[in-house]
Image (spheres, helix red, strand yellow):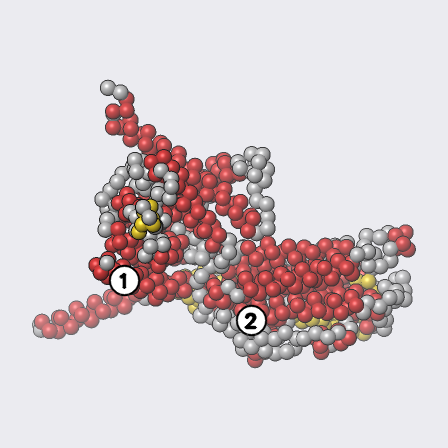
Amino acid sequence: MSLLDNVWVVLVIKLAVATAVVFALALVVMFAELKVSAHMQHRVGPYFAGGRWGWAQVFAEALKFLQKEDLIPRDADRPVFRLAPMVSLLGTFAVIVIIPLSPVLVAGNLDVGIFYALAAGSVSTIALLMAGWSSGNKYSLIGGLRAGAQLIAYELPLVLAVVGVVIQAGTMSMVGITEAQAQPLFHIGSVGISLPYAVSGQIVGFVIFMIAALAELVRIPFDMPVAESELVMGYLTEYSGIRFTMFLLGEYAGMLAMSAIASVLFLGGYHFWGLDADWFGPFVLVGKALALVFVMIWFRWTWPRLREDQLQSLAWRWLVPISLANIAVTATLKVAL
Amino acid sequence: MTTAEERYLLAKHRSEVAVSVELQTEDMTLNIGPQHPSTHGVLRLVATVAGERLEKVQPVMGYMHRGYEKLAEVRTYAQVTALVNRIDWISGFANEVPFVIAAERLMGVEAPERAQWIRLILTEMFRVSNHLIFLCSFPAELGAPTPLMYALRERERVLDLIEGVTGGRFHPNFNRIGGVKPAAGGGGKQKTVSQDLPRGFIDGTRRAMAAVLRTCDDLEGLVLGNEIVQQRTIGVGYLPAERAIDHGVSGPNLRAAGVPFDLRKVDDYLPYSRFDFDVVTATNSDAYDRCRVRLGEIRQSARIISQALDSLPSGPLQAKVPRVIKVPRGECYVRAENPKGEMGYHIVSGGGRRPYRVKIRSASFCNLTVLPSLLEGALIPDIIAILGSLDFVLGDVDR
């Protein structure tokens, strides 16, 4: 009996690999933000750390944060204050594990995969609320409450945008949705042409999903919970050192997770024309996710921030009705065709 | 004994009272500043907020009081210019000009034409620099950090030229009673060989102004044309013209309210009447208009500078003044259109080497007095937009 037959050993290995991959990719995204923002702003960005392109900058910064004193404000609700960064990371990790990297590399192919992903992804907003409440700081409190209001407003369009995909694919499993997009839509000669949902039918859903995802991730133009020019740093005001780093990692891993979900739902997941999904699947999926991450970074360094009331009216007056209409149209077409 | 109906009504009443008591929320006092990312220094706002909405706001000024009026009394006239540079440190040179002109008027001397032209060119360059700072910090306060880098890049060109002439970037201390300082960094010997503007200044200025104008077009399209910026600023912080005049608001903030008042047109402290330029005004008097007026003023300043370079007269940089400057007994008030608004010095001279009393009228202080009425009923994000749109410097407020 080999060691790999033991379920616990396999579980530990899986966890270690997943953690390492997620952290590595989050660091890549962090570095991308530093570099991309620099070039968008006519700067060079990190340059010296590590020798070439400043590639070691993120490690240097992580080490710096690790050395910082562990500060907890006197008025803070200590257990909640300590727990919040972990909850933030937890939600993100819970989402990432179910994303299918290739037909064989699936950690867990749940029948209700997308349902689970959206539910688990919302957990990180609870972390923001916890952080805002427990910091014992008025700016943090306002930031946390803004985060809560934002979650309620944007969870709905997010879910409704996904419903269109679920109807079109006829399944809630992430693998199922990916495979549904790989089915040839029409034939040119004997070659079957398949199109991802972002092109074939769910373009409205894709746009709404990305807008709502930006709001869920508290990225500009929806970063009111942080809003450093108004609320100092929002719910992050009192955080420093390792806990701040965890929030930061959570944010970047969250960007990656949301982008990966969007890639699976709308961009064909691990499939790419002419590439064998068994071998190239993980690279294709990560590539698509990183492309979406780039778009998020692009927005971040291009646009200002909306106001809290404008964010609410955008969600309730535009995104929710449009996504409902999208569902109605999708369902009608599904039945009619 | 009460009937069942009475008991029911009593319970209903009690529950309603309980609900109304429960919903009565307490206002929160939010202390914004003196240390806060968006208060441009050490302004403090004691705000009473109900949720996101502001009920009442009380600005607290004076954290940066440096006592310049008193300090000026124990310095000679030539030394005071080094002080007043630091009042509004973003437009240092422009602060010197009215003080020096006031002293000159009391002494009855006038700076030679070339010195006046150089004063005018440098003042306009500081106006460009100041408005570029505004155009970079204002979007940053709305959450867009990128325009900052582009506006600062252009400002750097202007600062380089200013440094070439005066030797200083922020605090040039370049004015002398009766003219301007001859040549940058020159000692006694160098004065004889390089007594004028550095070589390449005129061409360099033309190139810099062309670059600034290009960036102005970019900023107009990308910042002012941005939907989110418009949503955040149009209609925010409305300042009626009457109230602006009542509070002594001046400069771009006043012109954005539709009042075409510009001391460059009204007064004669520098030869502005020789140049062709427009007073930029707007009608809506909101944060967006204040931003637009400043953008327009950059263009007008570039226009003035290019005309001034064309017509730059030759001649000495200094009028004949005694070696030890003594200002005759008397008093006078000179005001100037500074980048942030009207700046004036009332000098009372006792006839000695030092002013007897100096009263400084700075633009930012008067511009900030409208703050409580502007902020009433605003949302927390609007506080930042309104504060930013007023374009003040705390050194200019507290002096």
Residue drawn at 47 percent across, 59 percent down: A305
SS label for mark 2: helix
Q: Is residue A95 visible?
A: yes
Give the x, y percent position of residue A228.
49, 54
User: Residue flagged by tag 1: what amino acid is it?
Assistant: Val
x and y percentages locating residue A131 in the rendered image: 38, 48
Asked if marks 2 and 1 fall on the same chain, the answer is no
Q: Secondary structure at mark 1?
A: helix
Residue at left offset 54%, top offset 58%: B140
Q: Which residue is most to the front? A: A189
Query: Which quarter shows the C terminus of chain A?
Result: bottom left
Q: Which residue does the image show at 46% across and 40% down from the upper left?
A: A28
Which dot, 2 or 1, sits closer to the camera?
Answer: 1
Placement of A58 over or under A181, stated as above or below:
above
| The quadrant where residue A7 appears | top left
Q: Could you say which is closer to the camera, residue A331 or residue A140?
A: A331
Q: Which residue is mark 2?
A: B289
